[in-house]
């Protein structure tokens, strides 16, 4: 197969594909010689990567939003080895793949970050979807990994280099990418304020985010003969009821799937909900399994479900003590109740906003609390727990959902119960990611990609029901951050998205 056909099979318009073996990602600096990143640094790097997806898919501000994500000496490396460094070159590359303000395609998950001597490096999984392009059926187009170098500038964290590589099976002897095999540990501030509504600090949340983000890499790569995966657990940790202890967990990862390797992607995680517990913390995480072949074969959403975790803090940092995977399972059928009609708002919050000198200064705790609010949304919606009131209580008392359902009683009626859209304690459907958060004078606003997946029974491939954006207004209350409004916009491409010249 020609080089171009190989790239075309792995990319959608606007996806920049790079050489993996020739372009060497930065390696981890020696211990003791790395920057001391704070929890806020990790969260700001997350926001940088999130903004990338919106900038690339929308082509906002004529591509300048995308160009502004790079440092002055940073750039994007093309398959030819050419580096797109100038703002004009980067903006032009984004414009060529733009789908419009409501077009969504790049869903970025499993974001791991490690400090280096002069900044940080990162890696993520990318699932690339066609969502209703030209009114056609939605589908999974491709997937792979991003590998990044980040640098902190006077304007904030920026990409110094970004690289995308399509999913690839098997070991690659020439590949010398960073393994991201050690979960991070953050220094605690000497006068750390008490966490709001939680016994976990922002540093705890970030460390737990990084721990769970490393899980797919350990499982997919089989790094260190499977010990990377095993060492995410406590020495007597367990996956399910059979894989208990380091050697059993190592064998599970090492034998997980033939063909695994450093650029293999399969397990995508999102909606990471973390709650404090008496002996550590608990987690509930959505998972979808994507089969992304090399070459021209179509990609498939195989199945989905959720993890239920118990975490403990050890002398080496946070580790998984127990992890249980529960496949998607609708609850018992009930008589259908009337479903609220979800209207479409006509005015969207702009992606590129003028900086407001009066905007709140969001702390690391604020970002964490807003992230957790959004993570709880999908869990509460799909489970319909507490008869829908767990969902309603994510909003302020006079909050509005989808522009027309106002107040606790109306909002509690939204989580569906019935055969048409079943719910239940083990049901998963709303996968949300790319959570962009911006402060305002009286709180914050946010945007988030969402894809609604119907996981089929009897081994049949899953199907995409819809995809789009949530647009939110958040307010800080005595009980913590809550939604003031959440509005849904369906994905909508403006014209056919042309192929990006940066992918050639």
Image (tube, rainbow, N blue to C red):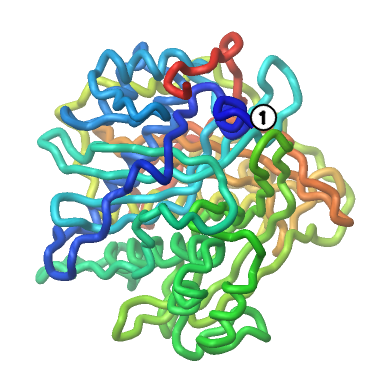
Identify residue for label 1: 342
Q: How many marks?
A: 1
Write the residue at 35% across / 42% down: 23
Q: Is residue 148 above or below residue 53?
A: below
Q: Nearer the viewer, residue 78 or 73?
A: 78
Q: Is residue 296 above or below residue 280?
A: above
Q: Position of residue 199 (x, y in %)?
A: 33, 73
Q: Is residue 248 above or below residue 52?
A: below
Q: Can residue 402 be spotted in the picture? A: no
Q: Secondary structure at mark 1?
A: loop
Write the residue at 64% across / 69% down: 256
Which residue is outermost to the top?
495
Q: Is residue 415 left or right of residue 448?
A: right
Q: Nearer the viewer, residue 410 or 52?
A: 52
Q: Is residue 240 left or right of residue 17?
A: right
Q: Is residue 350 above or below residue 440?
A: above
Q: Position of residue 445 (x, y in %)?
A: 37, 34
Q: Position of residue 394 (x, y in %)?
A: 50, 50
Q: Is residue 29 left or right of residue 337?
A: left
Q: Can residue 271 be spotted in the picture? A: yes
Write the residue at 31% across / 39% down: 48
Q: Nearer the viewer, residue 259 or 188?
A: 259
């Amino acid at each position: 197969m020609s080089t171009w056909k190989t790239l075309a099979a792995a990319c959608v318009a606007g996806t920049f594909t790079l050489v993996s073996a020739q372009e060497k990602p930065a390696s981890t600096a020696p211990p003791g010689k790395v920057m001391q990143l704070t929890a806020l640094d990790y969260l700001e790097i997350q926001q940088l990567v999130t903004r990338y997806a919106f900038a690339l898919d929308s082509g906002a501000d004529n591509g300048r939003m995308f160009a502004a994500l790079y440092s002055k000496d940073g750039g994007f490396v093309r398959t030819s080895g050419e580096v797109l460094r100038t703002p004009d070159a980067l903006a032009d590359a984004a414009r060529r793949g733009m789908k419009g303000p409501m077009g969504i395609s790049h869903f970025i998950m499993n974001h791991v970050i490690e400090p280096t001597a002069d900044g940080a490096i990162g890696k993520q999984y990318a699932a690339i979807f066609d969502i209703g392009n030209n009114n056609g059926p939605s589908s999974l187009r491709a997937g792979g990994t991003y590998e990044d170098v980040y640098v902190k500038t006077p304007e904030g964290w920026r990409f110094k280099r970004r690289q995308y590589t399509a999913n690839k099976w098997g070991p690659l002897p020439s590949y010398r990418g960073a393994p991201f095999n050690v979960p991070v540990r953050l220094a605690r501030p000497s006068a750390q304020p008490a966490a709001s509504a939680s016994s976990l600090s922002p540093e705890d949340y970030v460390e737990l985010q990084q721990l769970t983000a490393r899980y797919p890499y350990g499982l997919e790569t089989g790094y260190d003969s499977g010990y990377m995966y095993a060492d995410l657990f406590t020495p007597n940790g367990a996956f399910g009821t059979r894989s208990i202890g380091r050697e059993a967990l190592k064998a599970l990862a090492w034998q997980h799937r033939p063909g695994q390797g450093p650029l293999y992607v399969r397990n995508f995680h999102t909606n990471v909900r973390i709650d404090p517990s008496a002996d550590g913390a608990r987690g509930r995480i959505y998972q979808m399994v994507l089969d992304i072949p090399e070459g021209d074969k179509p990609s498939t959403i195989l199945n989905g479900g959720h993890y239920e975790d118990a975490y403990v803090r050890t002398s080496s940092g946070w580790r998984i003590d127990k992890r249980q995977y529960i496949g998607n399972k609708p609850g018992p059928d009930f008589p259908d109740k009337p479903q609220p009609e979800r209207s479409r708002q006509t005015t969207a919050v702009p992606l590129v906003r003028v900086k407001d000198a009066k905007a709140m200064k969001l702390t690391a705790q604020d970002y964490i609390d807003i992230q957790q609010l959004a993570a709880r949304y999908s869990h509460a919606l799909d489970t319909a727990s507490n008869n829908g009131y767990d969902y309603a209580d994510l909003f302020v008392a006079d909050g509005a959902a989808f522009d027309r359902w106002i107040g606790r009683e109306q909002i509690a009626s939204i989580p569906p119960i019935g055969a048409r859209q079943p719910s239940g304690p083990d049901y998963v459907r709303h996968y949300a990611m790319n959570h962009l958060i911006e402060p305002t004078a009286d709180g914050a606003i946010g945007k988030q990609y969402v894809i609604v997946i119907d996981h089929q029974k009897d081994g049949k491939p899953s199907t995409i029901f819809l995809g789009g954006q949530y647009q939110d207004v958040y307010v800080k209350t005595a009980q913590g951050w809550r939604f003031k409004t959440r509005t849904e916009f369906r994905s909508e491409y403006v014209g056919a998205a042309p192929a990006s010249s940066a992918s050639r």
